[in-house]
Image (cartoon, rainbow, N blue to C red):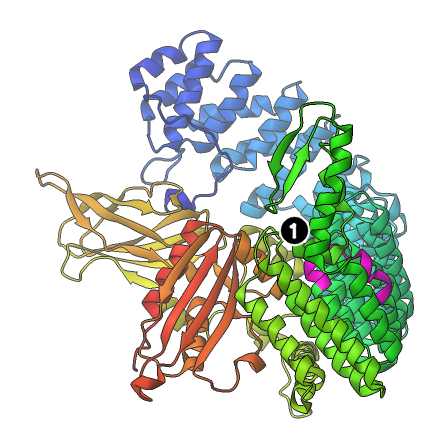
Amino acid sequence: MTAAENVCYTLINVPMDSEPPSEISLKNDLKGDVKVKTEALKKVIIMILNGEKLPGLLMTIIRFVLPLQDHTIKKLLLVFWEIVPKTTPDGRLLQEMILVCDAYRKDLQHPNEFIRGSTLRFLCKLKEAELLEPLMPAIRACLEHRHSYVRRNAVLAIYTIYRNFEHLIPDAPELIHDFLVNEKDASCKRNAFMMLIHADQDRALDYLSTCIDQVQTFGDILQLVIVELIYKVCHANPSERARFIRCIYNLLQSSSPAVKYEAAGTLVTLSSAPTAIKAAAQCYIDLIIKESDNNVKLIVLDRLIELKEHPSHERVLQDLVMDILRVLSTPDLEVRKKTLQLALDLVSSRNVEELVIVLKKEVIKTNNVTEHEDTDKYRQLLVRTLHSCSVRFPDMAANVIPVLMEFLSDNNEAAAADVLEFVREAIQRFDNLRPLIVEKMLEVFHSIKSVKIYRGALWILGEYCSTKEDIQSVMTEVRRSLGEIPIVESEIKKEAGELKPEEEVSVGPAQKLVTEMGTYATQSALSSSRPAKKEEDRPPLRGFLLDGDFFVAASLATTLTKIALRYVSLVQEKKKQNSFNAEAMLLMATILHLGKSSLPKKPITDDDVDRISLCLKVLSECSPLMNDIFNKECRQSLSHMLSAKLEEEKLSQKKESEKRNVTVQPDDPISFMQLTAKNEMNSKEDQFQLSLLAAMGNTQRKEAADPLASKLNKVTQLTGFSDPVYAEAYVHVNQYDIVLDVLVVNQTSDTLQNCTLELATLGDLKLVEKPSPLTLAPHDFANIKANVKVASTENGIIFGNVVYDVSGAASDRNCVVLSDIHIDIMDYIQPASCTDAEFRQMWAEFEWENKVTVNTNIIDLNEYLQHILKSTNMKCLTPEKALSGYCGFMAANLYARSIFGEDALANVSIEKPIHLGPEAPVTGHIRIRAKSQGMALSLGDKINLSQKKTSL
């Protein structure tokens, strides 16, 4: 057993720069005064932990240090005796240890309870029966000590001795049972009961059955152990459930949150009756509301989500949706996000109305709160949840829309954009709501502050205003939003008109300035704040145009064209038709004029000029074809997009429900617990054991179909077969560290001494500890384990060599250089999904970009995309509908997240060069963006390495 595999009880931090003292100087120090002895003893402990033997110091410590009564020395001695080698090389106990044993027998009878208790704790760590045997009477006597600290440590000592060396104290369960019956202290009772659970479960059950009615009066630490016992008993013997289920119900009312949590978890595993599930869920909800720690809230929410995954439990939880929504009072965004998602999953026609009322109240509340980053995000979450409710339950849309439309004028563009997306979908899907939405949209139109929202609102009004009155209202709103026209003349007049009064009130020396618009303005001591006020007074659309944002003008031109064409078809009078068309054309012309003038901050772009000119041409000609394109095909394309989106959502929901519905067919084989494989026992596994494994990082990973094959794939050969030492490593990747299991084989006929594996790392990897030296007999082999810590997602390299001395040879140390071990970034990357808006936001924020040119032998675009997805572990966010069909080029967004929480984005832009023939390979490039440089570079390297498809 190597040093790394020894059980470690004590960790001591060591300053690395200090020089280790010699054995002689330590001997002298150990004979000095108490302070010097203390420092010397600390140095001895550190040296032994570092692998030094120091056998000559043992008697010195026994003679000069062991008799001392100083508490610090006594504490250090406990550590020293734990780590010092206590046996000779052939496994016999050292003679000196008899003296040590006698000293500890005296400590177990010491009047100071701290010394007694800490000595009992130390005895838990001893693995030598010969040392423990003489101490047994003293340990038994400690069970009757007046102080609880001594008694509880005596119970632990008896438990570990009974577990390791049963022959030393065969009557331990009986002894502890009698102790438990008479004990009053909670911590002692807890330790005694825990020992009985593991050593003699029947006695533990006997004790529990005598006091099952008083369980609520026990301390929380004892209640937790009782819950564990009940779970274990019922797990092993389901017929016992009826006996203990009432006790678990009572523990749900415990004052301790930890007991309530464990009791609820146990109740769910013991019973699937609706009353039990409801009681457990109610307990979880109370915990979330009452606990202040957000991490606790998230953990308990996860348990509720797990409950929901079970089809029979879902209906019970649906009745508790209103209780779950009480969690929204928590200010933490992550908790609110999970709660809303859970509520949305549980919503049904029975409770949707109540849910919508609560969400509407929450939305209104966010409006009154002082602006905060999380308030905006929370408002977005609420809007999206209401959106989903309205799509699933169309009857609710009429109640929701008026409240949400108020937020179109919100300063937060993201929340307003979500509202706009919802309104667009609602107005397309629900014909009966169109008049209401148009009316509301016209009400808030003038107060919209964001240009992006303004464009969307214009499009909706232009697309869905179908009556003559609505069309005229839109035109009125547009005129009101543009202000006085023609714009250029009115702006110049305004400038000229405002100069005079300023000159009259000027006190300081007036100074002529050129404004950003290229016009002249006069500034004086009294008029410095006037231009800002003047800009505030501008109508919104006019303000956007003067700021140089002419994309909104192109959108306006399309809207005006649509409503003008519709007006022509609705109104028969030629005069009115021409008047409306002329007004629309005048607005477009004045915007074009403004764009070409020097007034705006930025001139109009050629694209926007083309668009507005096209709209002018369409209005002047009014051809039936253009009428169809503007008024029918735009709406059709939106309809196609929404139906594709809905189809995709239904498909993902169907997949989700298929996953959850566990159906058993009549001809399915019967599974016997004793014969089932580990992975088939998902509901039968011991939850306590699973949580312990998870804490230790030994969670059972789902291996490939053949576990042996998947393990062999990760074996890396480090040296050649003809080298004197052959080495190969199995690379086991855990969440935050890598374990290298290196097999070292001595291929020579000599004994190799001090055979050491020396490793170094490149990248964000760190070697935790140096592997210990070994001695290898001729043709012998050994396994050496080394731990490497991983801090971030990037490719790393582990390199090194094996050095050894040949027994009896006078030559220098021999060295065999090892091949490099490449740590693959793919072990840390998992596919993930995010919305388009989140993807764009991250794309804009991330500063590291890596552009990879496509160089492959794959000739099909879709096949190349699938190959990249498979080799990079990323998920394609672009819907399949958008990728289907064939047009010679393809663009797709990919997304993944590492286990460290780092995001990786990629945009694939590829095309098929048709002019080079059907066998021409795919060309193009992939742009990768990430927050850290290492992630972007490593992902780029991975794509470069795996681009070409290897022919099997």
Q: Which residue is mark 1?
A: 199
Q: Is residue 298 above or below residue 857?
A: above
Q: Is residue 451 magenta?
A: yes
User: Which SS does the magenta portion mostly show?
Assistant: helix
Q: Residue furthest bottom?
A: 667
Quick check: 264 left or right of 652?
right
Residue range corresponding to the magenta coloring: 441-454
Q: Residue furthest top?
A: 33
Tell me which residue sits at (38%, 20%) in the image.
59
Q: Nearer the viewer, residue 516 or 740?
A: 516
Residue 91 in which image quadrant: top left
Quadrant for the C terminus in the image: bottom left
Tell me which residue sits at (78%, 62%) in the image.
383
The x, y position of residue 251, in whole percent, is 85, 52
Q: Is residue 846 above or below residue 649?
A: above
Q: Nearer the viewer, residue 386 or 123?
A: 386
The x, y position of residue 303, in whole percent, is 73, 59
Does residue 540 appear in the picture of this structure?
A: yes
Q: Secondary structure at mark 1?
A: helix
Q: Nearer the viewer, residue 471 or 116?
A: 471
The x, y position of residue 332, in whole percent, is 74, 48
- Neighbour tally class for label 1: few under 14, some 14-19, many 20 plus, Cα within 10 Å: some
The x, y position of residue 798, in whole percent, is 31, 50
Q: Label 1 is placed on what type of residue?
A: Ala
Q: Nearer the viewer, residue 647 or 144?
A: 647
Q: How many marks?
A: 1
Tell me which residue sits at (89%, 76%) in the image.
469
